[in-house]
Amino acid sequence: MPDLTLFALYFAAALLLAITPGPGIFYVAARTLAGGRAEGVASSFGTGLGGMVHVLAGSLGVSALVLASAELFTALKLIGAVYLVWLGLRTFQSARREAKTMLEGGAPTPAVGVGRAFREGVLVEALNPKTAAFFLAFIPQFVDLGAGHVALQFMVLGFVSVTLNTLADI
């Protein structure tokens, strides 16, 4: 592991990045507004697990391979973009149906549920190639090559970052 001073610097930088609003927190906010606190918390844990996918992939070198291959990176970007567009379209359709139901005097449709909010959170974050690029650009600066166990150091530092992001989202 990096020495305590380097780890403290990493922690401070990761904390600053965690409290800076980004796509993850906007997704969580949208889920919270649409489905309440339970869905917001579930989506926060979902994005956290999706972030851990990138940490694991980065520690195993998979993310570096994807970023080194223009075709794989483009494919991941397109899959992520299509998924987000699909979620957006579903949200618009649901809002239209709910508005029509409300105008006709019906009850509002129920929230999507915590399970679905969690699964969508995982996919939103796991399909975000910018997260992979971020981890590969940020974490290696704080890995101590001389200490050995580079993959383990990467995973621990990534876990710290994901935990801070999840806590900030919640």
Image (cartoon, rainbow, N blue to C red):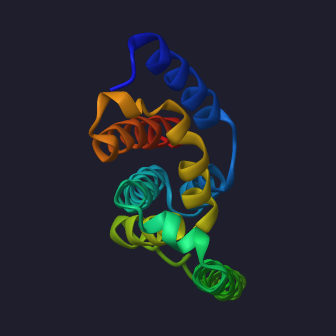
Q: Quadrant of the N terminus?
A: top left
Residue sitting nearer the eye, 125 or 60: 60
Asked if residue 151 is positioned above or below residue 10 in the image, the reply reads below
Residue drawn 41% across the image and 29% down it? 144
Q: Position of residue 38 (x, y in %)?
A: 40, 53
Asked if residue 26 is positioned above or below residue 79 in the image, the reply reads above
Q: Quadrant of residue 4?
A: top left
Q: Residue furthest top?
A: 5
Asked if residue 87 is positioned above or below residue 165 in the image, the reply reads below
Residue drawn 40% across the image and 36% down it? 157
Q: Position of residue 137 (x, y in %)?
A: 61, 47
Q: Position of residue 40 (x, y in %)?
A: 48, 53
Residue sitting nearer the eye, 26 or 6: 6
Q: Is residue 41 left or right of residue 70?
A: left
Whether residue 127 is visible here, answered yes or no, is no
Residue drawn 55% across the image and 35% down it? 141
Q: Is residue 46 left or right of residue 17?
A: left
Q: Is residue 63 left or right of residue 160?
A: right
Q: Position of residue 75 (x, y in %)?
A: 61, 86
Residue drawn 44% across the image and 43% down it? 162
Whether residue 65 is visible here, answered yes or no, is yes
Residue sitting nearer the eye, 28 or 51: 51
